Image: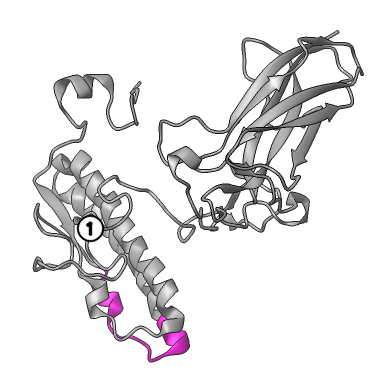
């Protein structure tokens, strides 16, 4: 078990020992600088090319991570388990870059020759077999050590669906899909949404109507893409002019079969509603949720949680912030 404390950067022993928890290595993966070999990229292909250049950087970072962890297994292992698979992944991305440019301009030549990488001493920035001293300014353009890319050096496994084996998500409530929608806008920590159930009954009878009072802060409740009509995970998160999340909040009650084991996640709750009332802002306000009654006796777990316009929990500035949710238990007799 590894526990991360504070903002999730280090475990307690690492903090005490002054270590960063990484495995030291004297080598790094060096790949040809694809961005430097490209012709003038047409404007209509720029976004797709940039995404694929960034994917190349992600692949190098993952190969670097594996080299650091397992590079002591010998040259044959490095060649067969790291460099050859990396070359295969790069060929696929280079093919996509070639196709993207070819659709709207002259077809680039020779990109497939840039697939092969090698192991170089630490200090090479991954731009090619000869180290370069000036990192490219094109996103993802061959610099895997300068810290210019999000997650550089963390061994990011994926940041898009390009290599996913799953079908693309289509906006409906289906699993086993890969969502390519950009996450969108993240507010400042002081503007991140929060909420609280401020009033609820401890006990109700079966089928007895009751109410929950919910207070929200920093949540503008004006955005709800109907999930049943294809609005699920299709829109990026958006902030209003004051930097507040635009969205809504959900309320659900489900009956618990056990108080010692978590409930089955796929079960449909006994009650569910989403609240988009055009209100909400920086100041706390309250909403009354009317629940018509719960038919089953036992312990009900009633929960509320914020959502952006497309039903994700709103993002937060820091890892050690608590998301906008609350939950209570109610006895149903």
Q: Nearer the viewer, residue 127 or 198?
A: 198
Query: Tag 1, which secondary structure?
Result: loop
Q: For mark 1, what is the residue?
A: 144
* Residue 268 falls within the magenta-colored stretch: no
Could you tell me residue 312's position as x and y percent? 60, 44
Report whether residue 85 is seen. Answer: no
The colour scheme is one colour
Residue located 11% across and 59% down the image:
124
Could you tell me residue 50's position as x and y percent? 37, 70
Residue located 52% across and 54% down the image:
165
Residue located 9% across and 66% down the image:
133
Q: Residue furthest front?
A: 283
Callout 1 environment at 10 Å: few (<14), some (14 to 19), or many (20+)? Answer: many
Name the image quarter holding residue 234.
bottom right
Residue 8 versus residue 159 in the image, above or below:
above
Q: Is residue 107 left or right of residue 183?
A: left
Q: Residue furthest right?
A: 207
* Residue 108 falls within the magenta-colored stretch: yes
Report whether residue 141 is seen. Answer: yes
Residue 201 versus residue 283 in the image, above or below:
above
Residue located 89% across and 26% down the image:
292
Give the magenta range.
99-115
Q: Nearer the viewer, residue 90 or 333?
A: 333
């Amino acid at each position: 078990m590894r526990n991360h404390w504070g903002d999730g950067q280090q475990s307690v022993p690492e903090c005490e020992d002054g270590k960063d928890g990484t495995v030291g290595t004297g080598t790094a993966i060096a790949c040809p600088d694809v961005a430097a070999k490209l012709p003038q990229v047409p404007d209509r292909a720029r976004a797709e090319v940039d995404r694929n250049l960034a994917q190349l950087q992600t692949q190098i970072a993952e190969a670097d991570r594996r080299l650091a962890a397992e590079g002591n297994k010998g040259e044959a292992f490095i060649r067969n388990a790291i460099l050859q698979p990396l070359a295969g992944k790069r060929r696929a991305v280079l093919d996509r870059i070639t196709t993207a440019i070819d659709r709207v301009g002259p077809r680039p030549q020779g990109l497939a020759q840039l697939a092969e990488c090698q192991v170089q001493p630490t200090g090479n920035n991954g731009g090619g077999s000869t180290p370069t001293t000036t990192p490219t300014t094109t996103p993802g353009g061959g610099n895997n050590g300068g810290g210019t890319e999000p997650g550089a050096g963390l061994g990011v496994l994926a940041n898009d669906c390009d290599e996913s084996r799953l079908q693309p998500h289509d906006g409906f409530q289906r699993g086993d899909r890969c969502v390519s929608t950009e996450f969108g806008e993240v507010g400042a920590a002081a503007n991140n949404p929060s909420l609280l159930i401020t009033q609820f009954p401890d006990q109700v009878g079966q089928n007895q109507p009751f109410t929950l009072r919910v207070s929200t802060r920093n949540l503008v409740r004006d955005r709800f893409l109907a999930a049943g009509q294809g609005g699920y995970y299709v829109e990026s998160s958006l902030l209003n002019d004051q930097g507040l999340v635009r969205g809504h909040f959900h309320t659900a009650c489900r009956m618990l079969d056990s108080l010692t084991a978590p409930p089955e996640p796929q079960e449909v709750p006994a009650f569910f509603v989403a609240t988009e009332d055009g209100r909400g802002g920086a100041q706390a306000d309250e909403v009354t949720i009317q629940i018509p009654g719960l038919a089953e006796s036992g312990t009900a777990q009633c929960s509320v949680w914020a959502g952006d316009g497309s039903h994700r929990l709103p993002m937060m500035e820091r890892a050690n912030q608590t998301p906008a949710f609350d939950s209570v238990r109610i006895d149903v007799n």
